[in-house]
Image (tube, grey):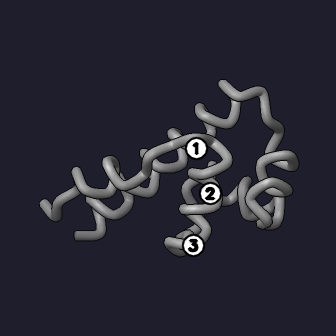
Amino acid sequence: MTKSFDNLRSELANEIKQSRRLLGLTQEALALQAEVDRTYVSQLERGIANPSILILHRISMVLGMNLSIRLRGTSDQ
């Protein structure tokens, strides 16, 4: 289970970083709009933070992402 969780966290980190960059946002701008700390955005993008559903929702709203599809597609292997 740990490996698939680590994979999910890594994929999520990449998705957040790529989406943020495509929108031309800095980590600070994303953090301000999502009402989280900038250092937390950095931790998310490096795959070391474990965000709550609320934080994922806030970030996905700012980035225009649909995270439910990514989360639905995971399974323990």
Which marked residue is nearer to the observer: mark 2 or mark 1? 1
Which marked residue is nearer to the observer: mark 2 or mark 3? 3
Q: Earlier in the sequence, mark 2 or mark 1?
A: 1
Q: Quadrant of residue 77?
A: bottom left
Q: Is residue 22 left or right of residue 39?
A: left
Q: Is residue 71 left or right of residue 31?
A: left
- Residue flagged by tag 2: what amino acid is it? Leu
- Residue at image mark 2: 44
Q: Looking at the image, which residue sits at the far left?
A: 77
Determine crowd level at label 2: few under 14, some 14-19, many 20+ residues with C-alpha closer than 10 A. Answer: many
Spatial CA span between label 2 and label 1: 8 Å
Query: How many callouts does the rendering have?
Result: 3
- Residue flagged by tag 1: what amino acid is it? Ile
- Residue flagged by tag 3: what amino acid is it? Leu
- Residue at image mark 1: 16
Spatial CA span between label 3 and label 1: 15 Å
Position of 63 relative to 34 (above/below): above
Q: Earlier in the sequence, mark 3 or mark 1?
A: 1
Q: Which mark is residue 72?
A: none
Q: Quadrant of residue 47?
A: bottom right
**Are dots 2 and 1 in contact, CB under 8 Å?**
yes
The secondary structure type at the circle numbered 3 is: helix
- Residue at image mark 3: 54
| Residue positioned 73% across, 64% down in the render | 40
